[in-house]
Amino acid sequence: MGQEFLKLFEERSFPVKSLKLLASERSVGKTLIFKGQPVTIELATEESVKGIDIVFFSAGATRSRALIPAAIESGAIAIDNSSAFRMEEGVPLVVPEVNPEKLKSDSRLFPVANCTAIILTVAVAPLKKLGKIDRLIVSTYQSASGGGASMMQLLEDETKAVVAGEVPPPSKLNTRYAFNLFSHNTPINEFGYNEEEAKVIEESRKILGMPDLKINVTCVRVPILRAHTETVTVEFDGPAPSEEAVREALASAAGVRVIDDRTANRFPTPLDASGQGDVLVGRIRQDVSNPNAISMLITGDQLLKGAALNAVQIAEEVLKLNPSTVA
C-alpha cells in the first residue's frame, strides 16, 4: 500500500512539500524512492505522527486505534485504510464518486471503506436515480492482493510448485490456494457470514445512505493476483429499468467504465482493472427470473480504487475544503 501511495502522489501531482514514511520496526532504516529521491523509513509512534498535516494510515486496525488519536490531537487529518473507525457513529465513510457531501471541513478522521464495498457502491450508486433499489445479491471473486503481499507471494509459490509437480509447502491457510477457490478466510459470525461479507453489507449501506437496504453477499478468494471481481443483481422496488437506461447511467457516472460487448464476448476482467482507477462494468442484462432486477459484472483494482486511490481522492477533496492545509 505504501508503494501505491507514493505512485499516486507523483501521478496525480499531489501537493507534497514534505514527506515522512513511517512503519514498524522491521522496516525502519529502509528507503523508498519518491520523485527520484530516497526517503528513509522511520518508526511509527505516537510522537512520529505529530506535527503532520495529513497522515495516511494503512497498518491495520490495531495500529490505527493506537496512533490516530495522537495524530488528530496534534492537528492532523487522518485518512485510515483500516476497519478501525468505519462504522463509528458520526464518522463519515466517503467514496468521493458516491457521497462527496459527507466530506466536511471540520472533520479530521476519514476512514477508507472496505475495498469490495467501494467497488460495489461505485457501480450501484448511479442506478439509484433509475428507481428505488430494494435488494442487492453479490458474489465476489477476490484476488490475492486483498490479503497483502504475503498472500500474493503464497499464490505465486504454490502455483510454481504445483506446475512443477511438487507438493506446496504448508501455509497459514487451511487449504491449498493454487488452482483452487475458498471462502474468504475471515471469522464467521453467528449468522454464518464471514467478516468480509459482514463488512460489505454494513459499509455499503452506510456509503449509499440506505441503512435498511437488503444485501446478501458471498465472498470467495480466487487464484488471481490483483483486482476484485463481483457479480451483482440489483432488485428494484418495481419494474427494473431497461438495459439501455442502465448502460447510460453507468457510462455517465464518475469512476465507471462500461465494457459490455456481447458480440465479441468482451467484458470486464481483473487484468483490465489492474493498475487503473475505474470500476469496470459489463454483462448488463435483465434478470429473466425477476422482472424487477438487473444483473451485471463489475471489477476494480482493490489496491487502487479499493484503497490507496480512494484515500488520495479523499485527501484531494479535503484540501479543497481546507486550502490552507499544506501536505
Image (spheres, grey):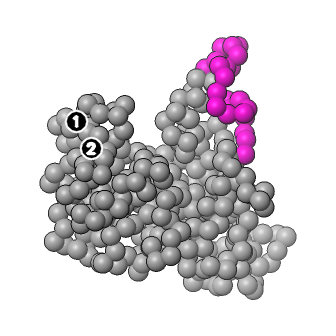
In the rendering, at what x and y percent does residue 253 appear?
A: 48, 72
Identified by mark 2, the residue type is: Leu
- Residue flagged by tag 1: what amino acid is it? Thr
Q: Which residue is drawn at 82% across and 69% down?
A: 288
Task: Tell me, for residue 40, which label it has, or none.
Answer: 1
In the rendered structure, are the residues bearing label 1 and label 2 in contact, judged by CB atoms less than 8 Å apart?
Answer: yes
Q: Where is residue 222 in the image (x, y as percent from the top left)?
A: 66, 41
Badge 1 or badge 2: first in the primary sequence: 2
Query: Which residues are drawn in magenta?
Result: 159-183
x 33%, y 70%: residue: 108
Give the answer, above or below, for where 28 lies relative to 82.
above
Q: Quadrant of residue 71?
A: bottom left
Would residue 2 be visible to someone looking at this image? yes
Q: Where is residue 99 in the image (x, y as percent from the top left)?
A: 46, 76
Q: Around disc 2, counting alpha carbons within 10 Å, would you say few (fewer than 14), some (14 to 19), or many (20 or more)?
A: many
Q: Which residue is drawn at 46% across and 77% down?
A: 90
Badge 1 marks a residue whose secondary structure is strand
Distance from disc 1 to disc 2, alpha carbons, whole Å, reads: 7 Å
Q: Mostly what secondary structure, the magenta segment?
A: loop
Q: Nearer the viewer, residue 42 or 193?
A: 42
Task: Please give the residue where the numbered disc 2 appears in the rendered image.
Answer: 21
Q: In this view, does 238 lie to the left or right of 204?
A: right
* Residue at position x 49%, y 35% in the image: 149
Q: Which of 134 and 175 is in front in this view?
A: 175
Does the image show residue 278?
A: no
Look at the numbered disc 2 and give the secondary structure of its residue. Answer: strand
